Image (cartoon, helix red, strand yellow):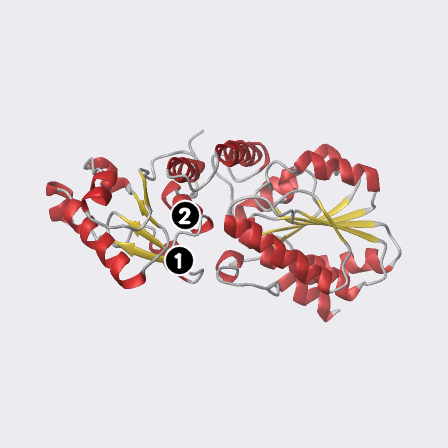
Amino acid sequence: MKYMHPRPSSIVAALYTARDLKVGVAILHGPSGCSFKHARLLEEDGMRVLTTSLADNEFIFGGQKPLEDVLRFAEDHFKPERMAVIGTCVAMIIGEDLQSAIDGAGIITPTIAVDIHAGYLENIAGVLATLEAAHEAGWISHDELTRQQFLMEKANEVERLRGAASQSYIEPSRGDLKHIAARRLLELARGGKKGVAILNAKKETAYMFADELVALHDTCPDANIRYIANLDRRGLPKTRLDAERILKDMRARDIEVEVIGALDEYGANGDLLGKKIVEIAPEFALISGVPHAIPPEYTQGIECFSVTNGPRQVGPLRSIGHQHIIVEIDLHPKTLGVRDIVGSEFGAVMRSF
């Protein structure tokens, strides 16, 4: 399918995957403006992002020397434990040999070359290219590579079936008014209805999506609600650490959390969560993070409050029967570089009641 609304970039996906692998410096081999916003945001998360700033002259004659220069600069100034060179559309078009530049730079820092560009329909190409390079370098095991490949396919499947890739164009929406959704959610919880509150979030976004569950517990501590979260300690180094921190934080607030799945398993977690919903048989459900991962047959007859950070996820969620859809705008930038649960807008509205 050709998408007419903007889709995530494989280059950006490669950068985030490098971050999850504890890469200290990532070098974008391309123009200075390539992936500018995400490169700046990732520096908030502790990874330096440099660029070779290729200009029209290098587009013609090649940019191996600028790349070698930046590699030496990065090693000398930042002394990282690991580095990654991330390709761009320009590097691909002019046929740059990233590995040759790494070899020619004379550096000793373990460094991987990720040959990638933005011309893929699905951004998981950037994730997989980075993981394959990491596996070749001995940074991850073959089992973890295979696991990640499976998880990426499942995440892609969810987006194609019920997510932002399910239609060629989806109108963006801010979702329902938060105070109206919050009033109804608390009415059910305080009225003795049986509920389930589920965190099924993607990686660092869980730092804010977890607050929706915390806020519900803060306002209705004695309600008949089961709490479930995908905070198992599996995955790449940063992902495991994030899960450990969030789970510890939730339990410190006296929330009894049942753990189902890991932070990188959000796309593969749908059936497990769905079967748990059937087992609990709730009258209402709060699902925070990637609610559309749960197939709709499991949520039929349940009043669903779904929290997403995607304005283009509102329409698909309505189409599968979710009654209340809340959008946390600009969630992702607010969860980069944090180490504790971050307050959410919907959580603040719940607490105001």
Residue in front for this viewpoint, 58 or 136: 136
Tell me, yes or no, whether the two marked residues, 2 and 1, touch with CB atoms within 8 Å: yes
Residue in front for this viewpoint, 201 or 298: 201
Residue count near mark 2 (Cα–Cα under 10 Å), binned few <14, some 14–19, many ≥20: many
Query: How far is the residue under mark 2 from the one under mark 1?
Result: 9 Å
Tell me if residue 63 can be seen: no
Residue 20 position, x and y percent, is 47, 49
Tell me the quarter of the picture where residue 246 sits.
Answer: bottom right
Q: Which residue is mark 1?
A: 47
Residue 154 position, x and y percent, is 56, 33
Residue at the image point whose x is 46% and y is 40% from the top: 140
* Amino acid on which disc 1 is placed: Met
Q: Which circle's residue, 2 or 1, is located before the other in the chain?
A: 2
Left or right of 258? Residue 337 is: left
Rendered view: 248 above or below 59: below
Q: Which residue is mark 2?
A: 18
Residue at the image point whose x is 72% and y is 68% from the top: 351
